[in-house]
Amino acid sequence: MKKNIFVIILLAFPFTTVLPQTDINKPSRRQSVSFEAGFIYPQGTIKESLSIRQNLSYYYVNQQSDGSISSSTSGMLLGARYEYGLPVIRSDISTGLRFVGINSEITGYASANSDFFYLRYSMEETDTKFARVKSLTECNYLLSIPLEIRVYPLRYSNFSLFAMAGLEYSVICFKKAADITFREEIMNPRKDVVLGNISGPVNRNYSSFYSSIGLKFGREDKLNYTIEVMLPSFLLTGNNFYFIDVDYLEGFRLSVQLPLKSK
């Protein structure tokens, strides 16, 4: 419920902005094409369904060392968007196509003098099987359609401050795969069996709500550049990853805007 209220507030924000209608502040109704590139950093935790023994204690040289597990998830985006100016509400609306690639990795060690962790991949009655694992990885590559609205509370002759809210939904999933690197190569023939036991079905559809604040540099009807920082955003679809539960998204984006024509 809180997420739905947050979405409504941000999407309604452009329509409630009231600023003086000066020649500098009022955007022209123009059309343009933007080419974008950026990085996204999903923040979350390792799924509880993964049976990782991360607190093994080893004794060596009269010292005790506990294991440690860490995860990292990051991604990139490339896209092109068509933008149309909405001077009545001092905003732009845009849509287009966007390629999104997200990779995650889980690494760890059982002790300070090791480079692996223990992963339970089978448990049948009294027979429990563990694998010594160096890393778990997954990749997600997709094509999505974004819909964004951008409002300009401050506009000057050479730069503007804006706030943006957007939605995106995937239309093509190019690749969604998981992989495992064992400590011993002798385990490689069992890779598919282990992955099948630890990675259940996931959602191939990807949808997110996101927002940002940023700066645009350049004059109207000229080449413009934008830089923006993504505010904490969230996925609208669940169970998108094999090994990670994502709580929210962060990131930043750079864009180049080419004007088409003005009205």
Image (cartoon, helix red, strand yellow):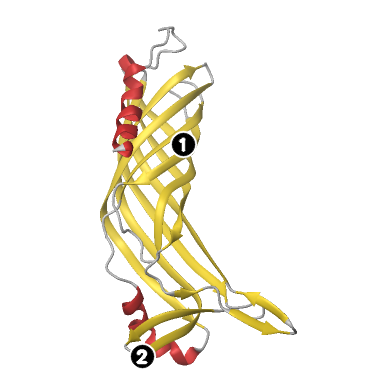
Q: Is residue 83 above or below residue 171?
A: above
Residue found at x 46% / y 52%: 43
Spatial separation of the CA atoms under disc 1 and disc 2: 61 Å
**Of pointers 1 and 2, the one earlier in the residue sequence:** 2
Residue nearest the viewer, comparing 94 with 154: 154
Choose top left, top right, bottom left or bottom right for residue 25: top left
24 or 180, which lies in front? 180
Q: Amino acid at mark 2?
A: Thr
**What SS does tag 2 mark?**
loop
Could you tell me residue 124's position as x and y percent? 31, 87
Left or right side of 188 for 125: left
- The spot of residue 85 in percent (x, y) is 33, 23
Q: Quadrant of residue 60?
A: bottom right
Q: Nearer the viewer, residue 248 or 18?
A: 248
Can residue 186 be seen here? The reply is yes
- 71 up-or-down from 206: above or below: below
Q: Residue at x 49, y 89 (%)?
A: 185
Residue 107 is left or right of residue 98, and the answer is: right
From the image, tell me which residue sits under label 2.
Answer: 126
Q: Position of residue 258 (x, y in %)?
A: 41, 32
Image quarter hosting the C terminus: top left
The quadrant in which the N terminus is found is top left
* x then y, percent, for residue 90: 36, 18
Q: Residues within 10 Å of mark 2 (few under 14, many from 20)?
A: few
Q: Is residue 124 above or below residue 242?
A: below
Task: Say which residue appears at 40% left-offset and 42% top-offset.
Answer: 233
Q: Secondary structure at mark 1?
A: strand
Give the quadrant of residue 260.
Answer: top left
Q: Which residue corresponds to mark 1? A: 256
